[in-house]
Image (cartoon, rainbow, N blue to C red):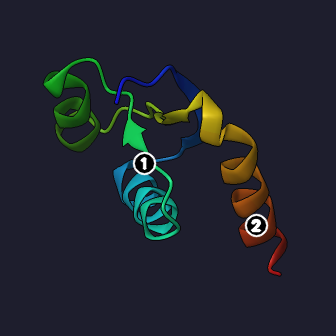
Amino acid sequence: MEYTWVVLIEADNDVEADIILGFLQEKGIPARKADSSPYTGAMRVIGGLAVEVQILVPDSFEEEARDLIDNLEGGS
């Protein structure tokens, strides 16, 4: 299936991004990181660059994903 991907949220680092990805995928929402280059991730680790990691979801899942993230951040 071909999706149109949209940015859902920006995680502060790869660990946070992986947690968010796992959470969304566990809820049945396709999600992926937006890194366009394998060097970006390496530079975050090696160079200590503060580059946010964009989390993408298909536009048809965006509202559901935002609700889940909002509820998660709200602690409910």
For residue 15, which quarter of the picture? bottom left
Q: Nearer the viewer, residue 33 or 64?
A: 64
Query: Which of pointers 1 and 2 indicates the residue nearer the eye?
Result: 2
Quadrant housing the N terminus: top left
- Find residue 53 and report its horizontal and vertical position in percent: 44, 36
Q: Does residue 14 sit above or below 56 in this rendering? A: below
- The amino acid marked with disc number 2 is Glu
Crowd band around label 1 with a 10 angstrom C-alpha radius: few (<14), some (14–19), many (20+): some
- Find residue 70 and report its horizontal and vertical position in percent: 79, 59
Write the residue at 31% across / 39% down: 48
Q: Does residue 29 sit above or below 68 in this rendering? A: above
Q: Nearer the viewer, residue 26 or 53?
A: 26
Write the residue at 83% across / 81% down: 76
- Find residue 38 and report its horizontal and vertical position in percent: 15, 26
> Left or right: where does residue 73 sit relative to residue 65?
right
Q: Does residue 50 sit above or below 40 in this rendering? A: below
Residue farthest to the bottom?
76
Q: Does residue 12 sit above or below 18 in this rendering? A: above
- The amino acid marked with disc number 1 is Asn
Q: Which residue is mark 1?
A: 13
Crowd band around label 2 with a 10 angstrom C-alpha radius: few (<14), some (14–19), many (20+): few
Earlier-in-chain disc, 1 versus 2:
1
Q: Which residue is mark 2?
A: 73
Write the residue at 29% across / 37% down: 44
The label shown at residue 42 is none
